[in-house]
Image (spheres, helix red, strand yellow):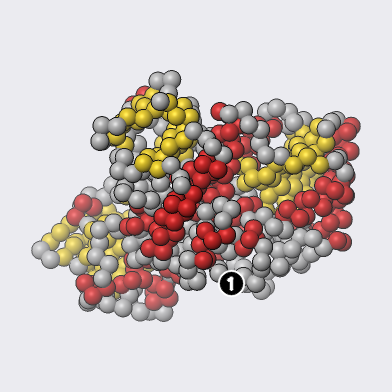
Amino acid sequence: MIKDYIIIGAGPAGLQLGYLMQQNSADYLILESGSGVGSFFKQYPRHRQLISINKKYTGDTDPERNLRSDWNSLLNDDHKLQFPNYSSRYFPSADTFVTYLEDFHQHHQINVLFDQTVDRIEKTDVFTIHCNNGQTYQCRALIVATGVSQENIPDIPGIELCERYSNTVTDPMDYVNQRVLIIGKGNSAFETADNLIETTAYIHVAGRSSIRLAWQTHYVGHLRAVNNNLLDTYQLKSQNAILDGEVVNIEKLDNEYKVIFSFSRSNEVHKTLYYDRVICCTGFRFNTDIFATSCRPSMTIHDRFPEMNSQWESVNVPDLYFAGTLMQQRDFKKSTCGFVHGFRYAVRSLFHILNLRYQNIPLPTHTLPPSETQLASFIAERINRTSALWQQFEFMCDSVLFDQAGCHYIEELPVAFCHDTFGQERKSYLSLSLEYGPDHDKIDPFNIDIDRVSQDDHENALNAQYLHPVLRFYLQGKYVSTHHMAENLENEWNRYESHVVPLQQYLSSCLKLVTEATVPDTAEV
């Protein structure tokens, strides 16, 4: 029997999509290679502490707003299946997260077949999936939710001699008085280094790129404060060091490693260094080996991720979609699709897109009268509660479509999808997103000498640096203008004079243009 949908992978993304399909009686099946859900999190992170925050006590009773501080829950209607009910730790254990996923699967009776390792995927009119146990499955649309499961090993002579993040010993006592080189500058590298600070003789963390700190860039995949203790030891002269440049060659000599390193910020072009251990912590990549040549997805970003369009569909294989951390190809190192608190909303959006394409089910819509007062009231209430736009800043938006029947409010779509769809159809519409100011990742937020726009200053909201609502208006598919709502310390954009009145005035101008159906010069408001 040919299924409408098959999902490969029963991690958080597969379960999230499976839940939505189960609740809507979709014809779907999830194939999982392991014997249970959440296989990736049974092994990673290696030191078992997640860097996804879990704020149990928020002082707020609104479950939607609380998801802004809950980065681990999957979207569902059962309050008992919110992750803060499982742990009060701010950075919880990965083992607890696996337990949560197991309960989520069991409670919602999500349709998963375990021990189904996919060997090969072929495509004619439909996808055919061959598993190593001899089972074969077919579907109209295939959604891959396996994550980036293959280690990303750099092309360095001698790299095969090194330990890998996946198999290195995690007991710090195994490294007593040893000289350790860690290749990589991401969270896995610094997580490993942090675990070894107390017992090693010294640690060098090496990589080509500069270290970027998540608190400055707002990208949670950059180095997190919880993992950056090594930076203190480096800058406070405690033997450890950060090496900027490239490892040129690794050689094993008796009981030590000889490493040739090329510095990027020194006159010393090459230097020979010696270590007792070398550990490769250079991230992960997507594995395309299971795809037949005729349906192998194109890759991008150094061949680490499948290339997708704005619907998370492969650019070269129709009906092949991606869910979960693979979705970050569309917002790589900009927003949050690479993490549960981001992709849970992207998966929900994908579900609605799949319904529209394959089941002819319209996108969920609220219809409002063409009144700037009522529309402003609806937007203000929505923007003050939404967790989706909060977590998926700049990447996802709400949209308001204008026609003779009124204003049609659609929640949580990728910004690019709106432009690709509504823009191509020459519709008149608004997009509403939460965004930081220009060059926000280049500004030191702790420097009090930098001029900043005062909170609630709506006249200068255009130059606000902190997260704030941004509306953009398109008339018959053509960009017209932008409206910035003033930033606010409490993230409450409902003050009458500084938020509501300017919003009403802007909406009034948009509605007037829709009525007149003319396209003026573009402007910032």
User: Please, is residue 254 above or below residue 23 in the view?
Assistant: below
Of 395 and 83, which appears nearest the observer? 83
Q: Residue at x 41, y 55 (%)?
A: 102
Q: Quadrant of the N terminus?
A: top left
Residue sitting at 33 percent across and 71 percent down?
195
Question: Would residue 168 appear left or right of 444 to someone viewing this image?
Answer: left
Query: Badge 1: few (under 14), some or many (20 or more) residues near its Cα, within 10 Å?
Result: few
Residue 107 lies left or right of residue 286; in this view the side is right
Residue at image mark 1? 57
Residue 63: x %, y % from top left: 63, 61
- Relative placement, left or right, of 108 versus 345 is left
Point 43% across, 52% down: residue: 106
The x and y percentages for residue 277 are: 22, 65
Where residue 172 appears, as percent x and y from the top left, is 27, 73
Tell me the SS state at disc 1: loop
Q: Residue at x 73, y 53 (%)?
A: 382
Where residue 227 appears, as percent x and y from the top left, is 42, 68
Q: Is residue 434 visible?
A: yes
Q: Is residue 271 visible?
A: no
Position of 438 relative to 414 (above/below): below
Dot 1 amino acid type: Tyr
Which image quarter: residue 279?
Answer: bottom left
